[in-house]
Image (tube, rainbow, N blue to C red):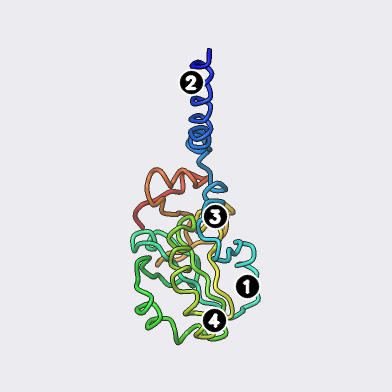
Amino acid sequence: MNRLAHTLVALLVALSFIAPQIATARAPFTLDAVRAQVRKDYGSVAQLSAKALVNIMRKEEEFLLLDVREENEFAVSRIAGAERVDSGIWRKSFMARFGDHVGGKMVVFYCSVGVRSSRLVANVQAALMEQGAKHVFNLDGGVFAWHNENRALENAKGATDYVHPFDAHWGKLVRRQELLKSVP
C-alpha cells in the first residue's frame, strides 16, 4: 500500500506541473488573449487603445505614427498618416531616422496584433524619451483591433476596407474574414 501511495503522490505532483500547460494549450486563440499576452510579455510598454488614438488624431495633437509591418502588409492598408518601419531596425538606425522628429510628440507604434511593435517599442522607448518624446505607446491589439472596430484604413490609392492577414493563423483574429487581402 505504501508503494501505491508514493506512486499516486508522484502522479499528482506530475499533473500539477502538466495541467497548467494543458490549460494554456487549450486557451482560445482570440485577439483579447493575444493582447493579454503582449501586455504580460512587454509590461514596460504602454498600450494605447484605438479610441484613444482616434482622440489624439482628432485633437490634432503632435504625434508620430509608425507601422511596424512588412512592405506587403503596409501596401494593403494602413492607418492614415503612418510611416512604415522595419521591425528589426537597429536602435541606432531608428534614432538616426526618427530621433530629430519626436521632440514634444507622442510616438505610437503598431503592427498586426502588437507583438512586433511592442518589441520595437521596448528597444527604442528610452532613447525616444531622451530625445524629448512626450509619450511612447503601442497600439493595443494593433491594426487588427483597429480594423475589427471598423475604423478607417487607407492604402496608396485611398480608403480601403481590407487588411493584410499576416498569415492564415494570425488572420483568424480578423472578424470580417471577407476583408482579408494579401495583395493591394
Quarter where residue 89 is shown? bottom left
Label 1 sits on residue = 56
Residue 132 position, x and y percent, is 54, 85
Quarter where residue 164 is shown? bottom left
**Three-letter amino acid code at the position of disc 3:** Lys
Q: Which of marks 4 and 3 is in front?
A: 3
Q: Residue at x 44, y 83 (%)?
A: 99
Q: Residue furthest front?
A: 2
Residue 39 position, x and y percent, is 55, 57
- In this rendering, is residue 15 above or below 7? below
Q: Are marks 4 and 3 in contact (CB under 8 Å)?
A: no
How far, Cα to Cα, is label 3 from label 2?
36 Å
Which mark identifies residue 25?
Answer: none
**Three-letter amino acid code at the position of disc 4:** Ala
**Few, some or many residues within 10 Å of mark 3 (<14, 14–19, 20+):** few
User: Going from the N terminus, do you reach mark 4 or mark 1 first?
Assistant: 1
User: Going from the N terminus, do you reach mark 2 or mark 1 first?
Assistant: 2
Secondary-structure class at tag 3: helix
Label 3 sits on residue = 40
Q: Residue at x 47, y 85 (%)?
A: 101
How far, Cα to Cα, is label 4 from label 3?
24 Å
Quarter where residue 86 is shown? bottom left
Secondary-structure class at tag 1: helix
User: Going from the N terminus, do you reach mark 3 or mark 1 first?
Assistant: 3
Q: Residue at x 36, y 52 (%)?
A: 182
User: Going from the N terminus, do you reach mark 3 or mark 2 first?
Assistant: 2
**Three-letter amino acid code at the position of disc 1:** Ile
Q: Which of marks 2 and 1 is in front?
A: 2
Which mark identifies residue 7?
Answer: 2
Label 4 sits on residue = 133
